[in-house]
Image (cartoon, rainbow, N blue to C red):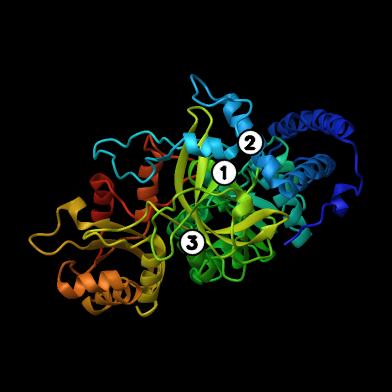
Amino acid sequence: MVIPTSSPILFGSSPRSSLEMLLLWLLLLLLLPLPLLAMHWQQRSRGARPCWLISLQHRVAWGLLGWAAVWQQRKLERSTLNVAQSQQQALRWCLKKAQGSCCLPRENTDVSTFQNHLPLTQTSHTQEKESEEKLLPSTLPQYHGDAPLQATLLGLITLNKAYPEALAPGSTACVTPASPWPCSVPWLGHALGRVSPVGAKDARTLLLEALISPGLRVLEARTAVELLDVFVGLEADGEELAEAIAAGSLGRLLPTRAAELQEALQQGPRGLALRLWPKLQVVVTLDSGGQAEAVAALRVLWCQGLAFFSPAYAASGGVMALNLWPEQPQGSYLLPPGVPFIELLPIKEGTQEEAASTLLLTDAQKEEDYELVLTDSASLTRCRLGDVVQVAGTYNQCPVVRFTCRLGQTLSVRGEVTDETVFSAALAQAVGQWPGAKLLDHVCVESSILDSCDGSAPHYEVFVELRGLRNLSEENRDKLDHCLQDASPQYKSLRLRGSVGPAKVHLVGPGSFRVLREALAACSSSVWPPEMPRVLRLRRLVQLLQKRVLS
């Protein structure tokens, strides 16, 4: 996997670092007044920005983007060709930034000394020790380094090469208040050619602006689960949105477009995106924990026939891994060797127990699984993040990985370990046997959380949101337990002995998981990016779903 270091839109030149930075600042100074000028035009006549202004903004933004991307590409090449040196520099940066007393010499500490003196710590990310009344603040380090900027700049370049017309002016719409691009820069909207109103943050306004723009080629949302919520909400509120478009709520009377929206919705969810936007090519969302089911549902239903691209993987605590390969259907991500300082903890085969010591990025082996470990410079602690990756290849000397699961998302009612990957695969197999059903989302709960054993053996409680099935028969509910036994010999053994009871499945109504996500986002321990948990530990969160059970 190698990407070229030059591109037609990068002007094909190789400026020196100082000259390059000077040109970047000059271009930025030229661009900064343009949003104010655009606002002035919008205030005078909404939606009537002159074509020359739109074109100028787009050209200057792409000029700035091109130079910045050359710079970041060079930094990435240097760091990935000298991974050991880059990680040593990252370690020195952590030691230099450490606050308070430190038991290590900060100038001449090698990696082995650092690892021997600082033990690994467990994060509170999994909610396992949180009280029912209040979520505890997260202890995860919030590091970003160069990765968000590199993911944004290089992701835009590779996306533009894969879909040459996708980023033309007026071809992109973001339907969530937050963008999927990890680094927020003032000129990004102009480079993307977004149709969103200047300063718009209301989700309904963003969706309306996208709906009245039939020529879209790129649809953006911060995460896949948020985009799923947008489409579910669009179906529920479609009539109201069509009336708003016809009445000119955005300053333009568009009765024809309102009629097109109503007609598209009447044909059902499958292929809805392409009916609304016939030129649509790609969906851009930020990948993070718990997004796989939402992506699968979007691919099968609303976004059928469209490509998906995630510019980065946002692991627990905001650690960024870069995606330089938009053409690959399954996300492959480059772990950057710079700040923050990342280590890899081997996962023993067949278990989720840690090995004796961590490895550096250069020691990663292909097809092996590792848990990410991050050093927090503020307190100089080495935190296990719980995110597990599998090495798929290399980029220069750096590992290219795929994220597989999160260690905190495991079920255990009798000492067994049913991890996120095993359970999700068993559930997908069971849903495949439910006629007409498409899985939108799910969470699991250990029966002890709800005191729901009632004298019976402890078991799993499973809440699912489906499309295409309004009632679950007992026969269909039993299929999940059979699939779990097939997937996990340990679970099967406990079931045969009667130590664990059969999993109970509850079907919840449309929008139930959106309510759950809103409750999670309001929690004080919410980390960025928003992850979708698969195992709930708090009774009050589960009760939100219990109130919405249909069957």
Task: Please determine whether, in this image, residue 378 is positioned above or below residue 396.
Answer: above
Give the structural element (helix, strand or loop) at label 3.
helix
Give the structural element (helix, strand or loop) at label 2.
helix
> Dot 3 surroundings within 10 Å: few (below 14), some, or many (20 or more)?
some
> Dot 1 surroundings within 10 Å: few (below 14), some, or many (20 or more)?
many
Q: Nearer the viewer, mark 1 or mark 3?
A: 1
Task: Please determine whether, in this image, residue 376 is positioned above or below residue 172.
Answer: above
Q: Quadrant of the N terminus?
A: bottom right
Can you see residue 200? no
Image location of residue 476, percent across then percent down: 28, 77
Nearer to us in this view, 464 or 7 = 7
Q: Nearer the viewer, mark 3 or mark 2?
A: 2
Q: Which residue is mark 1?
A: 342
Give the Cα separation between the discs numbered 2 and 1.
9 Å
Q: Amino acid at mark 3?
A: Ala
Is the Cβ of the residue at disc 3 closer than 8 Å to that at disc 2? no
> Dot 2 surroundings within 10 Å: few (below 14), some, or many (20 or more)?
many
Q: Which residue is mark 3?
A: 292
Q: Amino acid at mark 2?
A: Ala
Give the structural element (helix, strand or loop) at label 1.
strand
Image location of residue 179, percent across then percent down: 59, 45
Label 2 vs 1, first from the N-terminus: 2
| Name of the residue lying farthest toward the top | 100
Image location of residue 25, percent across then percent down: 82, 29
Q: Which residue is mark 2?
A: 90
Is the Cβ of the residue at disc 2 closer than 8 Å to that at disc 1? yes
Which residue corresponds to the image point at 53% horizontal and 27% vertical from the top-left?
104
Task: Please determine whether, in this image, residue 309 is positioned above or below residue 201.
Answer: below
